Amino acid sequence: MASTPLLSPSATTVAPNRTSSSLTHQLFHLTSMVPFHTFPAKNHRLITKLNVSSPANKPVTSPTSKKPIEEIIFFDGGAHYGDLAANLLLGFTLLWLPLTLAAIPRAFYLRYRFTNLRVTVISGLTGQDRSDFSYKVIKDVQVVPRFIGEWGDVVITLNDGTKVDLRSVPKFREIAEYCLSMAENPAVLKEDSTGPRGF
């Protein structure tokens, strides 16, 4: 079956006296008459919906960050110097020599620090042994005066039953009262009723 031409023979036939420019013009005219089917452009972008919890007229503000609490030192120091002096004087006796040998490293390498946040005990030749605990874990504080009450021991009992013995602390009563005032469950300061003990 023969297909019918799109253009009639009369339209495609060109007279011999026409120029090539008129032929080109006629072809453009014929091609402009051919209908073209246009397809709508597809949009491939995904549409997402945002749910805004705050009202449109109220600006969103970022949460303010809390400033860290400044650590204030109440006491920072080592053992009382009188402890070392008294033990050196009594160290000439052979019976007191072990206590004198224990007082020397305590005087030079032991350091206590009481701040508004924690209690720190630093020991060792280079301070490598360090223990920290918060006032929140303190259950009880006791003091034991030494010599004539110039210095003393502070025994801190923690909630888990651990006892921290701080030896030869200067201003031991003030420090013990400060620890109790900073604790969550403040208690009455307990002092050994037998009076000041040895060194």
Image: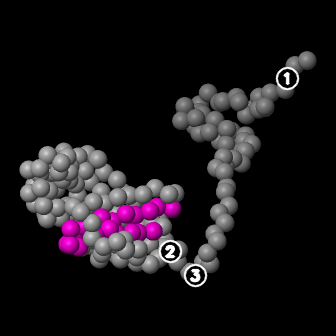
Circle 3: residue type: Asn
> Which residue position is annotated with label 1?
3
Visible residue check, residue 149:
yes
Instruction: Tell me where residue 70 appears, x and y as whole percent.
Output: 32, 71
Point out the image quarter for the C terminus: bottom left
Q: In whole angstroms, how far apart are the C-alphas of marks 2 and 1?
A: 106 Å
Magenta segment range? 140-159
> Which residue position is annotated with label 3?
57
Image quadrant of residue 39? Answer: top right
| Residue nearest the viewer, comparing 107 with 116 | 107
Q: How many C-alpha atoms fall within 10 Å of the one at disc 3: few (<14), some, or many (≥20)? A: few
| Residue nearest the viewer, comparing 165 with 94 | 94
The answer to if 5 sits in the magenta stretch is: no
> Which residue position is annotated with label 2?
185
Image quadrant of residue 11? Answer: top right
* Callout count: 3
Q: Secondary structure at mark 1?
A: loop
Whichever of labels 2 and 3 marks the residue nearer the N terminus, that label is 3
Using the image, determine if residue 158 lies above or below residue 53: above
Instruction: Tell me where residue 67 appears, x and y as whole percent.
Output: 38, 71
Main SS, magenta residues: strand
Q: In whole angstroms, how far apart are the C-alphas of marks 2 and 3?
A: 48 Å
Identify the residue at image location x=40%, y=64%. 156
Identify the residue at image location x=40%, y=76%. 189
Q: How many C-alpha atoms fall within 10 Å of the one at disc 2: few (<14), some, or many (≥20)? A: few
Q: Is there a contact, CB below 8 Å, between mark 3 and mark 1? A: no
Using the image, determine if residue 7 lies above or below residue 157: above
Identify the residue at image location x=29%, y=77%. 174
Point out the image quarter for the N terminus: top right
